[in-house]
Image: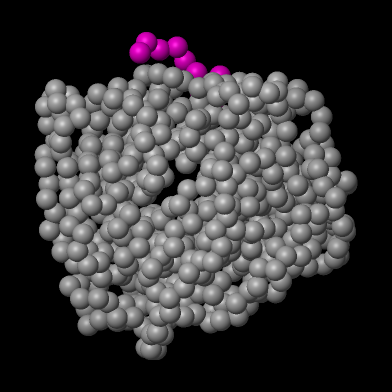
Amino acid sequence: MATEGGGKEMNEIKTQFTTREGLYKLLPHSEYSRPNRVPFNSQGSNPVRVSFVNLNDQSGNGDRLCFNVGRELYFYIYKGVRKAADLSKPIDKRIYKGTQPTCHDFNHLTATAESVSLLVGFSAGQVQLIDPIKKETSKLFNEENSCQHLWKVDWNEERQNEGSKTSEEALVTVQRLIDKSRVTCVKWVPGSESLFLVAHSSGNMFLYNVEHTCGTTAPHYQLLKQGESFAVHTCKSKSTRNPLLKWTVGEGALNEFAFSPDGKFLACVSQDGFLRVFSFDSVELHGTMKSYFGGLLCVCWSPDGKYIVTGGEDDLVTVWSFVDCRVIARGHGHKSWVSVVAFDPYTTSVEESDPMEFSGSDEDFQDLLHFGRDRANSTQSRLSKRNSTDSRPVSVTYRFGSVGQDTQLCLWDLTEDILFPHQPLSRARTHTNVMNATSPPAGSNGNSVTTPGNSVPPPLPRSNSLPHSAVSNAGSKSSVMDGAIASGVSKFATLSLHDRKERHHEKDHKRNHSMGHISSKSSDKLNLVTKTKTDPAKTLGTPLCPRMEDVPLLEPLICKKIAHERLTVLIFLEDCIVTACQEGFICTWGRPGKVVSFNP
């Protein structure tokens, strides 16, 4: 792990850091925040989140930025490394009463310079569809009374009366008919203009269609499919209404989900510590993983969909192979809960040459690492070529990052010696046991994001090989449905809905930087699912949760303190890295060679 100095210097906020590809610099003039730039008092509030969209307008400045701070929601032109941020001119600003924004997502498919669809989830369970360009509110979901009180924004008056009550939007907090718990994650279904998925702290997920209503009475459900610790229901009604599907996943809050790059699979992480990966269309469980301890808080996919990284209350990042359905590495660098993980598609590299040892000097990597949109767009196809049986040997390095409640940013490289260790691990600090070195890889039935049938080389002695999960169901999955989910609702079998029993998350992982919202205990009742409850003590040392000494332990390339408050955002863009902390400051870090001089 790279370190600079010691003692007091280690606690200083860093404004730059160096990796093999060069120097990353914090750009103070590209910082976004509330217009007055006053740090937000974050005690007890929901995490600050950031969403980006590109409108592809002819001005060349089509990036737009949305972020929430407390009960406020802002929408700005994002100028990145090119120009200084102008906080006095937000395109749209909304202040909510009675509830707070918790997450949001743009529909990239329908975004234009004149209109953009933005979904916003709230702490009281509602989901709102708004257009911040037209300053319109289209629909409100999960709310019996859709009446809303809107006040138009007068920016001149606001600037003259700083701190006074200005534009506000009140979501009437009456009975919510679908789910009363906090919205933890909301995303548009990839490739769809109308379908979106919403997760709640109750452990439920709901599939909506923006073109359908939610009805004026509580929905009735019929069972579609159930399995180990999950059940999926459809909405039973005479006419099509929202929600189209209801998922009940695990125990406790469903903290985050992420679609695979091709949109066919869905990875979910829950407060019960489990990663569960589903085929989205066929609603089949592909594989599972258990955290070392505590809940899992964040999840992301590699650009080619072959690996999933999670982070959570065990302070670790865990790398899970989608093809093999097993943990292949853990990373230790954070001192508290890991709040966000993300892959960097612009630094993930593929070199079509003889496999090289990644323990050499920094100069060995200069020709390997490049930036640019063309590079990122070609990465996935080159990663696919890496797995073809007749391609030349290639060397691959996946770059990913993580931020946590310890206010630190960590960058990690996942290299060939971890993915396919032909020789003793050179970069991983590990004490591994060789187990089942000749076991054939599981899940190689061609049913993965890319082409897993030929993505794994012939079995080799691996220091991190383990018996494969018996609960992955990778070899017995049904085929993915070709039709859209909504079109199949009328065909679902009618089965009775199980009674709901109240559950409570028993253990809270206490840390110096811990916050109550992460271990939120919902009072909502959860649907019963097939019960083969997993004892955490019995999973340790199994393929679900290998012991620390059974898999490589990664150390971060860099681990830097970059904020005063816990970090909640990490996004990799073409020419910069974007981070945000709970004080409401969104920071831009220029990539090597991408910083240009500009006048504020």
Position of residue 128 measured from the top left corner of the image (x, y, whole percent): 25, 54
The residue shown at (88%, 46%) is 424
In percent of the image, x 11 and y 39: which residue is there?
Answer: 152
Residue 554, x across and y down, in percent: 73, 43
In this view, the residue farthest toward the bottom is: 495
| Above/below status of 188 relative to 480 | above
Q: Which residues are magenta?
A: 590-600
Q: Is residue 556 above or below residue 79?
A: below
Q: Nearer the viewer, residue 507 or 527?
A: 507
Q: How is the image coloured?
A: one colour
Question: Which of 279 and 428 lies nearest the eye of the viewer?
Answer: 428
Locate the N terminus and report the quarter of the image it occupies.
Answer: top right
| Side of 361 relative to 591 (left or right) | right
Reply yes or no: does residue 276 show up in magenta.
no
Please, what is the dominant secondary structure of the magenta stretch? loop
Number of numbered labels in the structure image: 0
- Quadrant assignment for the C terminus: top left
User: Looking at the rendering, which quadrant does residue 538 occupy?
Assistant: bottom right
Q: Is 27 rendered above or below residue 49? A: above
| Residue 372 or residue 99, whichever sits in front | 99
Q: Position of residue 312 (x, y in %)?
A: 58, 52
Q: Is residue 443 visible?
A: no
Residue at the spot 85% in from the left edge and 53% down from the top edge: 432
Left-right relation of 519 to 462: left
Rendered residue at 50%/18% (across/down): 595
